[in-house]
Image (cartoon, rainbow, N blue to C red):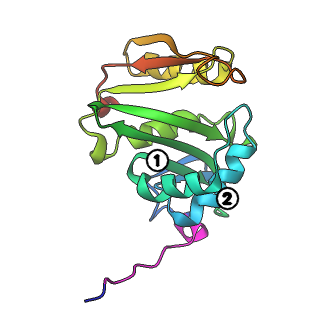
Amino acid sequence: MSTPITPFTPSADLARPTVADAVVGHASTPLFIRKPNADDGWGVYELIKACPPLDVNSAYAYLLLATQFRDTCAVATNEEGEIVGFVSGYVKDNAPDTYFLWQVAVGEKARGTGLARRLVEAIMSRPELDNVHHLETTITPDNQASWGLFRRLAARWQAPLNSREYFSTEQLGGEHDPENLVRIGPFQTDSM
């Protein structure tokens, strides 16, 4: 007995309101938020490379995120199907009420649009995350863009934000700034 193979829809075809979870931005330059797929792995990899100070992982890692973790990740594309935003994360096995956000990236073409917040809220609004009431991430002390995003999310969701050192420079091999664990919650997803 053979398993039917379902073809992937190319990214450009997914950049349509009928397929996207959300359409954001201006009418003249809409952005489409949706779950990623295997065709997005390389585009996500290229986006992350263009967004320092983010740590760049292998293209294979982004393919795994786009396929194995697609329900807890999101991409944003423009009308041409170019990936201009990405959020990756997962629901923690040992704390199923907590979403751990691994990376958030917004390309230069989409900066200043509120896309990072919209990507996070698109994920948090999915039925698969109905039982999630906390968001965690790690942020280096000098990453002001990420600190600003998570402070705005906490204020918008009317939830407390707590932070503590999580990984020291020594634990990260001495060549990486320390990472602080940031936790927002509890919050209600129906308010997003």
* Residue 140 image position (x, y, % from top left): 62, 19
Residue 114 visible in the snapshot: yes
Residue 83: give x, y in percent of width and height.
64, 54
Image quarter (top left, top right, bottom left or bottom right) of the N terminus: bottom left
Magenta-colored stretch includes residue 5: yes
Mark 1 Cα-neighbour bin, 10 Å: few <14, some 14–19, many ≥20: many
- Residue at which label 1 appears: 73
Which range is magenta?
A: 3-14
Please state which amino acid type lies under the numbered disc 1.
Answer: Cys
Q: Position of residue 132 (x, y in %)?
A: 29, 33
Q: Which residue is nearer to you in this view: 129 or 53?
A: 53
User: Label 1's element?
Assistant: loop
Q: Residue at x 46, y 55 (%)?
A: 35
- The dot on residue 83 is none
Circle 2 residue: 82
Quarter of the image where one finds residue 82 = bottom right
Q: Is the stretch drawn in magenta largely helix, strand or loop?
A: loop
Q: Amino acid at mark 2?
A: Glu
Residues at marks 2 and 1, CA–CA distance in whole angstroms:
17 Å
The residue at the point 55 percent across, 58 percent down is 63
Quadrant the C terminus occupies:
top left
Residue 29 visible in rendering: no
**Is label 2 in a helix, a strand or a loop?**
loop
Left or right of 8, for residue 60 = right
Whether residue 26 is situated above or below residue 67 in the rendered picture: above
